[in-house]
Amino acid sequence: MAEMLASGSDSTSEACAVAGSLLAKDGASLDEALAALQTTYQTILGTDPAYDDVRTVARSWSDAVLAYVHQMACDDPMTGLSSLAHVRSRLSELYRGELRGSDRVRDEYALVVAEVPAEADPHGADHDVPTRQRQEMLTRTMRLAELGDTARTVFSGTETIGRLGPDRVVVVARRDERLGQRVALLRKMARTVEATGVRVWIEGLPSDDGVAALLLDELART
């Protein structure tokens, strides 16, 4: 874009379209994209951007974001686990569709929750805070993805396995005679893989779909 402006070209729309799309794919917000356009204009020409160029950048940025949203699956891209919304939809299918009876859901299904504990910061208080936070987030995500893989090994059937917040994995599992054994195996395997105090427990489902939604929300926040 800067090269086009410096050359005195009157046709900058294509460069603006490319810039808007690339900025969106790099994770820049619309405000950041427009600020970059303004900075470029001010640096090269000493003026604010032309309206047509602002519109082109905004439109190409929006198109790129929409394309990403339309391609999103129900899985969390960082961990490969089902999203909380997908887990919620699965429970709704049970309450309102497949079993057609709230008591049956409570009797036949349960939530198996596995939690990765937080780790102390090895760098101490003097470590750069933003860098430390990024490292901690990446480490927690990797550990959660690993815990999710372990859960898939134990619950290898049609169970829905999803993410509950930054530290928890949830499995919508049947209450059969093997559930206790599977939970014990998951606890053993998770602790072996993580070498930390991973918590695994069975959470009973309520008899109401709305209360089940509140339960998921509470598990995701605590």
Image (cartoon, helix red, strand yellow):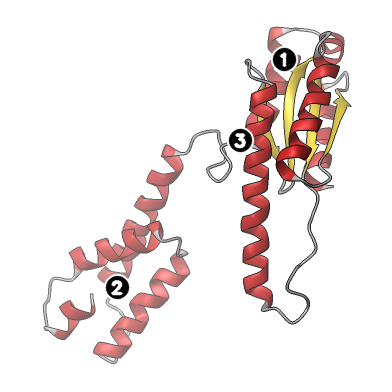
The label nearer to you, 2 versus 3, is 3
Residue depicted at x 78% and y 78%: 125
Q: Which residue is mark 1?
A: 94
Coordinates of residue 58 in the picture (x, y in percent)? 36, 62
Compare residues 57 and 191 and report the one nearer the observer.
Answer: 191
Residue depicted at x 82% and y 28%: 212
Amino acid carrying mark 3 in the image = Leu
Q: In the image, is 204 to the left or to the right of 143?
A: right
Which of the 4 quarters of the picture holds residue 165? top right
Check contact, mark 2 vs mark 3: CB within 8 A: no
Does the rendering let one see residue 128? Answer: yes
Q: In the image, is 3 to the left or to the right of 159?
A: left
Q: CA distance from mark 3 to mark 1?
A: 20 Å
10 Å crowding of disc 3: few (<14), some (14-19), many (20+): many
Q: Which residue is mark 2?
A: 51
Check contact, mark 3 vs mark 1: CB within 8 A: no
Q: Earlier in the sequence, mark 2 or mark 1?
A: 2
Q: Earlier in the sequence, mark 3 or mark 1?
A: 3
Coordinates of residue 9 in the picture (x, y in percent)? 11, 78
Coordinates of residue 119 in the picture (x, y in percent)? 78, 58
Can you say whether 184 is above or below 13 in the image? above
Q: Which residue is mark 3?
A: 81
Amino acid carrying mark 1 in the image = Leu
